[in-house]
Image: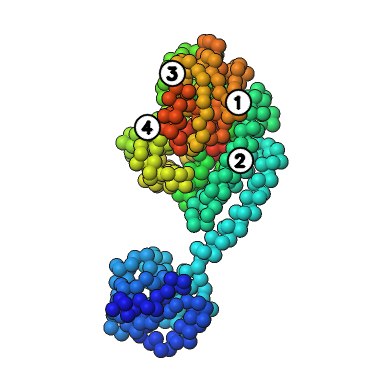
Amino acid sequence: MQNQNADFITKDKNNILWVDDEIESLKSNILFLKQKGYNVKEATNGEDGINLIRDNEFDLVFLDEMMTGMGGLQTLLEIKDIKPSLPVVMVTKNETETLMEDAIGNKISDYLIKPVNPTQLLLVCKKMLESKRLKGSQVSKDYIQEFNQISMAMLENPDWKEWIDIHLKMTGWELELDEHPDLGLKQTILTQKRDCNTEFSKYVEKNYLNWVNSKEDRPILSTEIVDKFVIPELDENKSVFLFVIDCMRMDQWMIMEKYLYEYFKITKDYHYSILPTATPYSRNAIFSGLFPSEIEQHYPELWKKNDDDENSKNNFEKEFLMKLLERRRIKLKNEVKYTKIMDSNFGRGIESKIMSYCNNQLNAIVINFVDMIAHSRSDNAILKEIAPDESAYRSLTESWFEHSSFFGMLRQLSTRKDVKIIITSDHGSIRCLHGVKAMGDKETSTNLRYKCGKNVKADSRHALFIRNPLEYKLPKRNGIINYVIAKEDFYFVYPTDYHKYLNQYNDTFQHGGISIDEMILPVVTLEPKA
């Protein structure tokens, strides 16, 4: 049976099966499709159609709804059992509400009303069989055009606002091309992204010192998040939630955002993370409203309580936030509610009682899962296999968010009109692909994207060297120390066992350095639609 039926199936044409007990009346339509280049096989009843589908590879089925013997709906169910992803277009005499609901529910891919005309057939075939190819072709054309525009923009000395625009365009195209992996443009956009980071690093190195020492003509920095986005929303009759997602990049936010359109009105702004783009610096800056050197100066007792372990340098975020509100003379009706979520069980617990948080005027919630994904991928061979590149890394983020307690919290909060939500990140991350030697003593910090200590050195082509930390608003740590901050996608490796650690940390997501993904971050305001 299979050999008899397989001879009409061709690889160079789209293969269509038309199942109808009045097939003779459709000969003109079938001839039309053949003339348009489609390969069409006929069946006069559901049983024969199912046998053909079982033994052959079809790309599309036209199925009559009302047939003698096995009816169209029963045939449809059999087809979906055999090949669930095979597109089926129901051909019917009546446009019933039930049929439309089946179409919407994806039991059928589309439907046509008899009598069917050739134009309708051609449109359905192109939509079902060629839309991906046609869209891919248009995407290729659009990206090549945009590629040239982005490349030109990078060479025209963009300012900080224009760098945000470049980043948004690049990120948008990364997500778009994720949907079309067969276009062969993956390496093109990766190369352009690297060129982008090269120019961006030059720009930051040239301008960053002015940013931290002036408030004119510069982007919003980490130190201004609470002042510019949180404090203006504080109201006794409203509950404000500040979510800080550790290590969330722009592309990861764009992946999450699409799940929120039905629940919220979304307003977006952007800020630049301070350097180093690492949690002890940038997140403390968010909650304190101060640069690291100012924290060390004004709150030495809190700064000194932090030890050299990066994960324990953020134990006083609530205290920093409360002191910021005190300096701004902000009086809340109740104490700030601060929560840090670092494991899934705790997150589910917070999700279950998040509505009770609406009694607080200000809630600050830190979520560490995105950072944990980055670190876990670096340490876990299975995760690295699951997410071998940035496209898969975004997919991993999407899978987490869709099933996360964070998304659950947001859905619940969307039911309250008296809630305002601000979401941002302390820093992003970059996939590190190039190692560079760094020199330092045994007291030097261990981060792969920045190092601080006495006589720390690295090649100036690949790192920003900071001789005087106070100029950059960085702490001096009770001694004479230097900082080196990696540019682009470089990571630091000590000369000792250089090749061992070069290979160990290659192709890992890191943070702390200068790149567009680490520095340019979203600040999103969500207002419930309900």
Q: Amino acid at mark 2?
A: Cys
Residue 96, label in figure: none
Query: How far across and how far down the image is residue 203, in percent?
Result: 65, 33
Q: Amino acid at mark 3?
A: Asp
Q: Are marks 2 and 1 in contact (CB under 8 Å)?
A: no
Secondary structure under tag 3 reads loop
Mark in the foreground, 2 or 1: 1
Q: Give residue 408's quadrant in the image.
A: top left
Secondary structure under tag 1 reads loop
Q: Residue furthest bottom?
A: 24
Q: Are marks 2 and 4 in contact (CB under 8 Å)?
A: no
Q: Residue at x 39, y 41 (%)?
A: 384
Residue tagged by mark 3? 308
Instruction: Please state if 399 lies on the left or on the right of 48 as rendered.
Output: right
Tell me, what colour scheme is on the image? rainbow
Q: Amino acid at mark 4?
A: Met
Q: Amino acid at mark 1?
A: Ser
Residue tagged by mark 1? 460
Q: Residue furthest top?
A: 479
Mark in the foreground, 3 or 2: 2
